[in-house]
Image (spheres, rainbow, N blue to C red):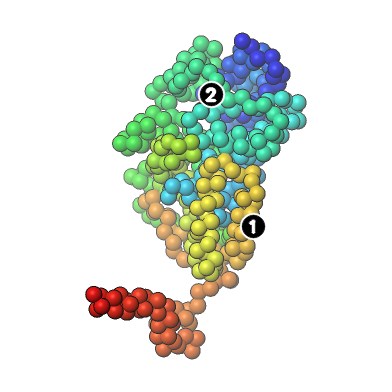
Amino acid sequence: MPNTNVHKIALAYSGGLDTSIIIPWLKQHYGGAAILAVIADVGQGDDYEQLKRKALRTGADEAVVAHVTEEFLTGYVWPTLQAGCVYDYKYLLGTSMARPLIAKVQVEAALAHGCDALAHGCTGKGNDQVRFELAYKALAPHLRVIAPWREWDIASREDALAYARTHHVPVEQSVEKIYSRDQNLWHISHEGGALEDPANEPPEDMWLLTRALRDTPDEPAYVEIGFEAGVPVALDGQTLSPVPLLTRLNELAGLHGIGRIDLVENRFVGMKSRGAYETPGGTLLVTALRELEALTVDRSTAELKQQLGLTYARLVYNGLWFTPLREALDAFMRAALARATGSVRLKLHKGHALVAGRTSPYSLYSTALASFTMGELYDQKDAEGFINLIGLPIKMQALLGQAGRAAQ
């Protein structure tokens, strides 16, 4: 029966298969409630005016676009980069970082336009439903949440395509080309289709941002990335704002086939899934900042930062962005990287980003100490006492063991 308790719904709208069919479905099942399609531009490169027209043509009453690519980088990507986040050994969290911002944009639009409900197109098996709804709880706990994938009888992408045909909703996906993709300026993800069997190699024509190795240049290229307190600010000595900086790195890395991963990951909801990700420029930034940290961050801080980075990665992946813990971790990361200023030179060649040099005015590396040449700063004779003190518990354990065996 139609639901008459909802009058206006803000839908997080991408124009993809799921959100496209949700508009007519909401109209049908929620008493003709008004639909506000909210589009977040996080650098996916869509034609946003065309997306607005499509939303209106398929039943939305209003459509708005929020251009938040720079906010995405400075407020979400850079903090996650500084934390050194890598989930399940490989994943650089491109989708995970974007979801809280998209939800924030959606909530702001809902409140500004008098909506009493929020809707999303996430399936009931994925992580994104958690990310969206935890953000809703933090930012607008009074608004009702509608998750069509948990309500309707559509059970597969094939069903969704059939629904789209029946309701004359234009979509790009087909039974033959049924990848589910998510893109922003940091990355693009691919799921579904041939990837559902982890025994299958990802088809070459699936990749969109990175060249096949056979098509990459035979000669390497070099790029120098400059950082201030762990924030990327320059390429090859030229100061750049975040969007053009990452755009250029995406182009360079993609040209050399850098940034592909094929991952079987542990979803927050408890199952394993398989996806393929392209993060070309992000791979360069992660590599470069890690090298700069090695030069400028002391050992104890670096060790703790590495441990907390795992916590931060799990927090971001699980949708816990708007939490006091994330804010506290950000404070630590900013302090830990206060002197991570300098530049790192990378050599790009055939899918690899190799470090070709690092410099920093705050470098903790001392040539005088590290050199094999004897110097005044380090007396090698001191090492004997150091080893004796560190080894005392080991020595005592061995002596006690010998005494015990002798007594038997």
Can I make out residue 328 in this image?
yes
Q: Which mark identifies residue 150?
A: 2
Kind of residue sitting beneath label 2: Arg
Can I make out residue 292 in this image?
no
Q: Position of residue 219 (x, y in %)?
A: 38, 55
Q: Residue at position x 69%, y 19% from top?
A: 6
Reading the chain from its start, which is encountered first: label 1 or label 2?
Answer: 2
Kind of residue sitting beneath label 1: Ala
Q: Residue at position x 63%, y 27% from top?
A: 145
Label 1 neighbourhood size at 10 Å, few (<14), some (14-19), many (20+)? few
Q: Residue at position x 64%, y 11% from top?
A: 2
Labelled pair 1, 2 in contact (Cβ < 8 Å): no
Q: Position of residue 364 (x, y in %)?
A: 53, 73
Q: Residue at position x 75%, y 27% from top?
A: 113
Left or right, 312 with respect to 62, comes to: left
The answer to which quarter of the image holds residue 362 is: bottom right
Closest to the observer, 387 or 317: 387
Q: Classify the position of the N terminus by image quarter.
A: top right
Left or right, 183 with respect to 258, comes to: right
Q: Which mark identifies residue 331?
A: 1
Left or right, 195 with respect to 134, comes to: left
Closest to the observer, 36 or 5: 5
- Looking at the image, is 175 positioned above or below residue 312? above
